[in-house]
Each structure stands twice: as C-alpha cells, then as structure tokens.
Image (spheres, grey):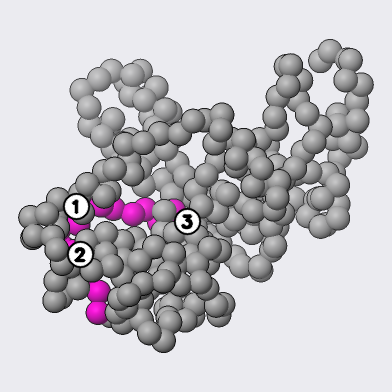
C-alpha cells in the first residue's frame, strides 16, 4: 500500500457516501480505468469529485470515483482519514446538473492535439524515465531525420512485477468489436465489409505494461513473435543487461552498420 497526494479541498466525504448518477451516459473502458488508476498511483488524486444535493450525487468524476474504489479495495492505497476530496455543486439546478454532466464530458472530447508538440513532449517525458503509455498515450518510436533513422533508441524500462496478466488485461477490443458488429449488420458488399473490418481493428487499445509483463515470462518463440508484431521493442544493450532475450548478431550489425550503405 502506498501513500498518495490528495487534492486540497474544503469538502470531504466518505467513499461510500458518493452516489453515482444513474443517468450518466459516459462509459469507461477497461483500458481507460487502468489509465486512471495508473494516474492516481503516480501523480496522486488531484481532481476532486463534483457532487450535488443531499444525496451527494456525482456530477463529474465517475471514472475517478470507480478507480478509487478499485485501488482501495485492492489495498493499493488507503483512503484519507478525513474523506475523499469533493466539490459542492449545489448552486446548480437539477436541469443544470444533468446538463453540466454532459457538457463536462463533451468538452474533453471536442479538443484535439498539436501532434508535433505532443510527440515532442511525450518523447521528452519518456526519455526522462516515465512511460506515458501507462496513461493511454502512444509513445513515439524512433525519430526520423533527413530520411534516416536515429540509432539513439531510448525505450522506457519496465520493472517486472511477477504478475501473470491475461489477454483481456493486455487488449481492450470493445470499441473495435462493437464497430465490427455494426459493419457485419450493414447493407454493404462483402468486399467492403472485409475492408472496413480491417480498418476497425485500429481501435484496439493495448496496455503495454501488461504486455511487458507477459513478454518477460513468455516462451522464446512467443517473445520473437511479439517483437515482430511491434508489441515489444527491444534495445539490445538494455535487453542483455536485463536478461530478457538472447539477441541475434544481425541486430547488432544493423545498428552498427555503415550509415552510407543503401539497403
């Protein structure tokens, strides 16, 4: 059990005092819940839960509340003695409470990213030792400069915990599966369906911490296939140091080859 930072707030409630809004239409996937739990464990619980009325109905923060329940039930963290930080939203009418619940979720979905700045920032954070894939971000791979790949391969190190994750822990295919069901039910040609189904698989979400755990315990053949599928990218120096794999000599030859040679 670890100690975490809790948000400063004038209001606190026992964990069982919060009442989730039964009208909340926002769904959280298994992968999203994992990202929220990882965020709380790493950064702390920094965003109080917004509640309304005498029944303490949750207006915003359903995902954070569920993540807290899971972490506390799993004895990964302990609840603070004075209760869970919350914000009182009693100034809202019942109508505005429901409207704000929708607006709060929608507002986070409407914004995009500056991809170049995002990749640069994630790259800097990753090089400093924090794996941003834990929080649902795609970590940039090898950087390209003047059509040549850099040899500076900087891959976040995972501390193997000895867990045995199952495939459901490693892959959230719920969005892809729902889209494939919709495609199969559509009135389009078989060729169009086949194309759309392949495209739908882009919505699969991988949990790379669990994948790293599985990889560390997998057979050599499974490890090789995971590498070829780019589920795991191995830096040969780090791999030798950690004893995860036996590297083929060709990998070193490729990394140390003449930059002037054309493949």
Residue 226 position in % (x across, y down) = 65, 44
Residue carrying label 1: 100
Q: Is residue 20 within the magenta segment?
A: yes
Between residues 258 and 9, which one lies in front from this camera angle?
9
- Residue 180 lies left or right of residue 211; in this view the side is left
**SS assignment for the magenta stretch, majority:** loop
Q: Nearer the viewer, mark 1 or mark 3?
A: 1
Quadrant containing the C terminus is top right
Q: Is residue 196 within the magenta segment?
A: no
Contact flag, marks 2 and 1 (Cβ < 8 Å)? yes
Residue at (70% x, 32% y) in the render? 142
**Quarter assignment of residue 196:** top left
Q: Is residue 81 visible?
A: yes
Q: Nearer the viewer, mark 2 or mark 1?
A: 2
Residue carrying label 2: 89
**Quarter assignment of residue 52:** bottom left
């Amino acid at each position: 059990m670890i100690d975490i930072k809790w948000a400063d707030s004038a209001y606190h409630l026992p964990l069982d005092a919060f009442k989730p809004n039964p009208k909340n239409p926002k769904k959280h996937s298994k992968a999203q819940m994992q990202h929220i739990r990882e965020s709380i464990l790493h950064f702390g619980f920094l965003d109080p839960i917004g509640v309304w009325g005498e029944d303490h109905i949750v207006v915003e923060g359903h995902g954070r509340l569920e993540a807290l329940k899971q972490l506390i039930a799993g004895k990964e963290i302990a609840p603070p003695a004075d209760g869970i930080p919350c914000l009182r939203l009693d100034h809202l009418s019942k109508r505005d409470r429901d409207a704000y619940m929708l607006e709060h979720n929608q507002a986070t979905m409407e914004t995009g990213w500056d991809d170049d700045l995002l990749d640069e920032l994630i790259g800097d954070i990753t090089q400093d030792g924090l794996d941003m894939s834990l929080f649902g971000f795609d970590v940039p791979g090898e950087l390209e400069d003047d059509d040549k790949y850099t040899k500076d391969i900087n891959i976040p190190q995972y501390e193997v915990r000895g867990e045995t994750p199952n495939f459901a822990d490693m892959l959230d295919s719920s969005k892809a599966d729902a889209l494939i069901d919709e495609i199969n039910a559509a009135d389009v040609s078989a060729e169009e369906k086949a194309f759309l189904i392949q495209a739908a698989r882009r919505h699969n979400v991988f949990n790379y911490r669990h994948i790293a755990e599985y990889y560390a315990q997998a057979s050599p053949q499974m490890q090789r296939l995971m590498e070829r599928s780019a589920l795991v990218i191995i830096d040969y120096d780090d791999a030798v140091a950690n004893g995860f794999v036996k590297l083929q000599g060709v990998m070193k030859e490729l990394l140390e080859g003449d930059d002037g040679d054309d493949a």
